[in-house]
């Protein structure tokens, strides 16, 4: 696997090595050994999958301490724009984001460390999204910032009229009104 650095330290894109032959393809979607060698130590404990239709925007989510989560995400069907926003108080890149297209064809994975809000928008007719988390789900620690916050400068590539959000995701604060529980 190849690890591609981004503008934010610790946020990386992973390109697995794909073996193609007459039958199709094969790749290691996660190797703890290689991940720890090239990215860092992480103990994933939960795998999630969601399916969404075009225009769905999920995010921007995080879990509050002590249940913070690092995530390794990918899109196994369709195409999404995936985004990590730095919400660590005192970070030189606070409020900045990294956006990456994850598709069933590019097989790219995106590593979102603790201290980041995460979300994605579905750019294909449907998308199946899978991810690993290094902490269990704790609904009481659920947190978010508004995925529609224009001040974040994210080009989601979804016309506003076609955006589909959960009710919960329409209620998160804007970054300017948000008191982050994370420190750099
Ligand atoms: C995230 C999660 C949800 N659920 C339940 C709660 C709820 O009834 C239902 C749907 O939950 P949500 O609306 O929070 O699902 P969703 O909006 O897809 O939440 C996810 O969004 C992306 C962007 C992330 O980064 C994830 O960490 C997670 O927050 O599934 C679990 O049982 N376990 C979990 O780990």
Image: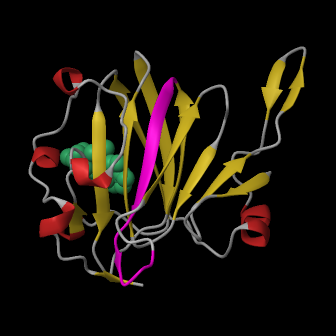
The residue sitting at 60% across, 72% down in the picture is 42
Say left or right for 46 vs 144: right
The residue sitting at 17% across, 66% down in the picture is 176
Main SS, magenta region, reads strand
The answer to which image quadrant residue 85 occupies is bottom left
> x, y percentage for residue 47?
49, 52
- Which quadrant is the C terminus positioned in? bottom left
Query: How many numbered dots are placed on residues in this image?
Result: 0
The residue sitting at 85% across, 16% down in the picture is 23
Was residue 136 drawn as part of the magenta stretch in this picture? no
**Relative to 128, does residue 13 appear above or below in the rendering?**
below
**Relative to 117, does residue 42 appear above or below in the rendering?**
below
- The residue sitting at the right extreme is 21
Magenta range is: 78-92
The residue sitting at 46% across, 43% down in the picture is 82
Was residue 91 drawn as part of the magenta stretch in this picture? yes
The answer to which image quadrant residue 62 occupies is bottom left
């Amino acid at each position: 696997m190849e690890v591609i650095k981004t503008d934010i330290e610790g946020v990386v894109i992973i390109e697995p090595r794909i073996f193609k032959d007459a039958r199709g393809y094969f790749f290691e979607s996660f190797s703890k050994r290689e991940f720890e060698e090239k990215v860092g130590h992480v103990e994933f404990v939960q795998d999630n999958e969601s399916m969404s239709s075009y225009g769905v925007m999920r995010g921007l989510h995080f879990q509050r301490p002590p249940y913070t989560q690092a995530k390794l995400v990918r899109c196994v069907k369709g195409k999404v724009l995936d985004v990590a926003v730095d919400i660590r108080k005192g970070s030189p890149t606070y409020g900045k984001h990294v956006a990456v297209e994850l598709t069933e064809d590019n097989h790219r994975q995106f590593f979102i460390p603790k201290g980041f809000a995460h979300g994605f928008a579905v750019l294909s007719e449907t998308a199946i999204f899978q991810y690993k988390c290094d902490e269990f789900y704790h609904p009481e620690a659920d947190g978010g910032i508004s995925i529609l916050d224009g001040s974040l400068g994210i080009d989601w590539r979804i016309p506003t009229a076609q955006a589909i959000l959960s009710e919960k995701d329409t209620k998160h604060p804007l970054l300017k009104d948000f008191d982050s529980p994370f420190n750099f």
